[in-house]
Image (cartoon, grey):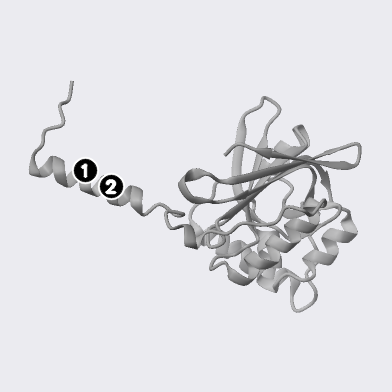
Amino acid sequence: MTVWKDTREGRGRAQRMRRLHQTRRGAAPGALRHWDMQLPDPLRLFQEWFAEARDREKSDATAMAVATADAAGRPAVRMVLLKQADARGFVFYTNLDSPKADNLRANPRAELCFHWPVLERQVRVSGQVDAVSDAEADAYFATRPRLSQLGAWASHQSKPMNGRYELEQAVARETVRHGVGPVPRPPFWSGFRVVPAQIEFWQQKPFRHHDRQRFTRIGGVWHHEWLFP
């Protein structure tokens, strides 16, 4: 059994632990935000929060974690960028030969999580996943920077490679192959739409007394409930 001795080292350790706890975000009530949850439409509320995050967050507000599971239920999570959010759902794009795409074909459900630390907020979205149409994917791909378009052709996403030089060689080959003309979308690159069945809004408050409110869509109607933090 370890005995905590009242020595200079022990007192210093205790002081450091107190300082660590005191620096937790939300320790100062004045830095926190609250919101009026009178809006019946969580998609509209998301758009309001998202617009504020894009204005105020220091990092990319479109960044979100995407959690999937394979046919055996093994989970995987990674960060991607939100490219569209509307009444139909939340869209991101990827290589269709990637592990995330394999997971979604085997188990077409996903959960998204946005974290906006400046606003002290997070949003979770879960639901069925559908493939976007070729027309949607083509339209989005055409807006990407040319080097990103070439990279989509060059990268065998998540497959092993023999160092970065192999990727650079592949990009150079695609640059020569496509010349100066438009770069079409690769047939192995497209998007997925998470159709929300449940959306949870989280707002940090002092002493872990956070606000959590969940919207669940049942029969096309959103139902709201408060959750304990």
Q: Which of the 4 image quadrants contains residue 121?
A: bottom right
Q: Secondary structure at mark 2?
A: helix
Q: Is residue 225 left or right of residue 8?
A: right
Q: CA distance from mark 2 to mark 1?
A: 6 Å
Q: Is residue 12 left or right of residue 145?
A: left
Q: Is residue 12 visible?
A: yes
Q: Label 2: few (<14), some or many (≥20) within 10 Å?
A: few
Q: Position of residue 215 (x, y in %)?
A: 76, 42
Q: Secondary structure at mark 1?
A: helix
Disc 1 marks which amino acid? Answer: Ala
Q: Position of residue 190 (x, y in %)?
A: 78, 54
Q: Is residue 144 left or right of residue 156?
A: right
Residue that appears at 10% across and 36% down: 6
Q: Residue 14 — which label?
A: 1
Q: Position of residue 131 (x, y in %)?
A: 83, 47
Is 109 drawn above or below residue 90 in the view shown? above
Residue that appears at 61% across and 57% down: 34
Q: Which of the 4 image quadrants contains residue 222?
A: top right
Closest to the observer, 204 or 61: 204
Is 142 drawn above or below residue 75 in the view shown? below
Quarter holding the N terminus is top left
User: Marks 1 and 2: in contact by CB < 8 Å?
Assistant: yes
Q: Is residue 181 left or right of residue 19?
A: right
Q: Which residue is mark 2?
A: 18
Disc 2 marks which amino acid? Answer: Arg
Q: Residue 54 — which label?
A: none
Q: Position of residue 75 (x, y in %)?
A: 61, 33
Point out the residue furthest to the left here. 7
Residue that appears at 86% across and 60% down: 136
Is 216 drawn above or below residue 72 in the view shown? below
